[in-house]
Amino acid sequence: MKASSFHLNLLKPSENLSSSPVRLRIMLPVGAILACAGLLVWWGVLFTQIILAKTQAQGIEEDLAAKNSAHAEAIQKRDLARELKLQLEQLEYYKSGVRAIGEPLAKFAEIVPLRVQLKEMSITPPKPQVLLPPGLKVPLFGPTENVETQKLVIAGLTTKETPVVSLMESLENGFEKLVTSEHHINSFKQDNAEIDGRKLLSFEVEYTMPERRFAK
Amino acid sequence: MNSGLFQNMAPNAKRSFFVTVALAAIATVLYLFCVQPCADELTAAKRRLAELQDRQYRTDVDLKRSSTVAKDLEDLETALKPFRDAMLVPLLESYAMRAKSIIDPLALGAGLEDVTYSDEPFRALPLPTPMPRQLHTRAAVKLTATGSYQQAVSFLLRIEKEMPLVSLQQLDITAQQNPRSQSISIVLEWPAKGGLTRK
């Protein structure tokens, strides 16, 4: 047993030094200083970025101001082009629905048999457009359907049925612009008119005409 | 116990503690009053910059396209010209009278007689999507006359040749005692400005 290793401990607990090489009383203020410095650097970086962004924004604003009138003109032209394109589209609808049947009507006179007297030839009016369908309070700007179908009605007198049949057969070829194959005999009956003492027969045939399609 | 610990601290440690507290306070003030407002301002500035860059990009694209648009406009005007030329415009607010001034020479040239003109209800054209600001419609005018079937057909052929955008809507030829003066009724259509229901 060594007597020299015994001594009185006169230190207070707080005076005990840690065996660690890192002193907390030094490291805490150093850390706080570093934090402050870091914040200052961060602030500086942010400030610089703000200045840069504002300078860049100012440059762009000046560029936009310089291009303003040219751009407004370009926009106006673009809008006008868009509008004209839509107008053209609607007028193209009209064009596609144009009916030109002068030639078949001229040709029709050549196929009417001698024993047929035409009394009337008519193209019926198209169905009225419904621009205020039930349930709607505000009228529509345009029709809901873009197809119109009309009828061609041919009425006349004849001596017997064969000339009418012959006329109908003739209409089957080369009159595609005037009539479709769909037809209906509205009437075929004895008439009061006479020729050479013979009672004539009246007939009325209704043909469906080719559709007028108001679309591209 | 904590106050006891603080009182028992060595003077150096106490000083260190106060310095640390003071620095922490400064750091807090720096963050709250300098860094945080700056960060907010930077976010706003970046957002504004992005908006401006986007606007600049769109402006540049629009300007680059302006030459193409000018060419498109030219093409559109060319394509619209036949329609504009064919458009029926009212004469003293009467479409029938305008139609008369246009087609009377053709009707008389074809040999039709007692020609009269009257307005018929217009018909709407289907709408493209989106709808244009200027709508167009089908202006209809009724022509009644007397003449032969051949004269009526001759008139229609002349119309088709001279005015290819005029369309036949209705036709009615009814036989009369005299085969040279039958009752003829023709409804013709023109393109015209204006919608039926648009105000």
Image (tube, coloured by chain):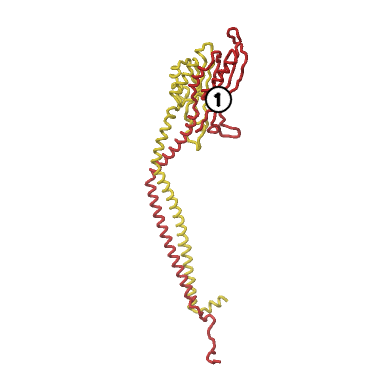
Chain colours: A red, B yellow
Q: Which chain hosts label 1?
A: A
The residue that appears at 47% across and 64% down in the rendered structure is B31
Q: Is residue B54 visible?
A: yes
Q: Nearer the viewer, residue A160 or B123?
A: A160
Q: Nearer the viewer, residue B154 or B88?
A: B154
Quadrant of the rendered image containing residue A116: top right
Q: Nearer the viewer, residue B64 or B54?
A: B64
Q: Residue furthest top?
A: A197
Label 1: which secondary element: loop
Q: Position of residue B69 (x, y in %)?
A: 41, 39
Image-based side of A161 in relation to B36, left or right? right
| Kind of residue at badge 1 | Thr
Badge 1 density bin: few <14, some 14–19, many ≥20, Cα 10 Å: some
Q: Position of residue A105 (x, y in %)?
A: 50, 20
Location of the N terminus of chain B by quadrant is bottom right
Residue at mark 1: A180
Q: Position of residue A166 (x, y in %)?
A: 56, 18
Q: Position of residue B182 (x, y in %)?
A: 51, 14
Q: Is residue B199 visible?
A: no
The residue that appears at 49% across and 71% down in the rendered structure is B21
Image-based side of B50 in relation to A204, left or right? left
